[in-house]
Amino acid sequence: MKPLSAATIFVSIAAYRDPQLPLTVASLFAQAEHPERVFVGVFNQIHLQEDQDCIAPDRPNLLQHVLDYNEAQGACWARGYVWNKLLGEQDFALQIDSHSRFAPHWDTSVLQMHADIGDEQAVITHYPMGFDTETDALDPQMYTYFNVQSFRATQLPEVTSGAVDLQAAPKRCAQTAFVAAGSLFGRGAMFKQVPYDPFIYFHGEEITYAARLWTHGYNLYLPNRPYMWHDYKNLNKRRLHWQDHKQWTLKDELAQQRCRHLLRIKKADDVRALHQLEQYGLGFERSLDEYQVFAGLNFRRQSLEEKAKSGKQYG
């Protein structure tokens, strides 16, 4: 196995009409200790005439595919494109959103965390702290963790985030049962073994991918040394897919049926919701029942245990 000092990282970015993309790409290269070992794949869905400010400038180690926004099909479809078309043979991979910022030496930090865990099936994930795109001011770093207080009307759990002072972070990365699509790090081969489901529109993306990873034998961990920030505050500063595409409601309804079917909540009513589901199903290393016990919830009964509500360490 390649030594940590030579490990390469592929960074996946699916962007939709986002003027923050060039700044995100600049940050991840500028703050990397070894930018020569960082490779970025961008699937950039833009208005070809109006969104020139959304294009990341050409540079080494950046592969950017541009698509007219009218042809865009949704967030997970775009993320799947990156993994299917742009991922190379890099040792590790990180999925982020196109409105992110990075801490100095983020690359060696996350690689060292993965090594310290000592688990080749480790996935490091959380909801990062925020930043302000107007001022580029970064929120103070804190230790964040997942919790679930309720289920949505769609019958999928509402996964949220809690935070405590960074000094209270565990010395070793603690296990969790959930993932954040905007900060998802693991072995590059993971995204090939557990491919992203392009038929999920947006909602349901994270809980289904968490269950799929866990049942394929991957273990989910919270970073105890945060290394990035995410923009939560300025959604009105960029166009969103559902603002431009009126047919998004049908896509989302089929996706919700697909998620409920996969998680054994309720069988899908519309056969279109099951298209190619066998390619994006659960794994066989551990069962969905075992995942629910581990996570402290029950999808069908819509019930939550205290460890899911509190976000207590699972490891």
Image (spheres, helix red, strand yellow):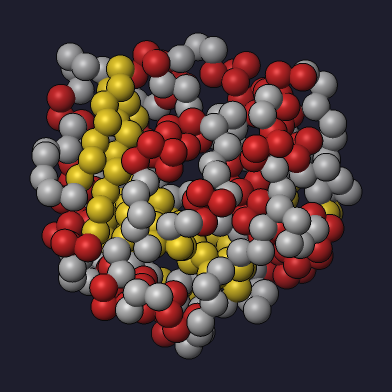
Q: Is residue 79 left or right of residue 43?
A: right
Report x, y in % for residue 129. 39, 60
Report x, y in % for residue 308. 71, 64
Q: Is residue 107 above or below residue 159?
A: below
Quarter of the figure with the N terminus: bottom left
Q: Is residue 30 left or right of residue 2?
A: left
Residue positioned 84% across, 35% down in the render: 266
Report x, y in % for residue 5. 26, 78
Residue 245 appearing in the image: yes
Residue positioned 29% across, 64% down in the render: 8
Quarter of the figure with the C terminus: bottom right
Q: Is residue 218 above or below residue 72?
A: below
Residue positioned 77% across, 19% down in the render: 271
Residue 233 appearing in the image: no
Residue positioned 70% across, 43% down in the render: 281
Q: Nearer the viewer, residue 210 or 115?
A: 115
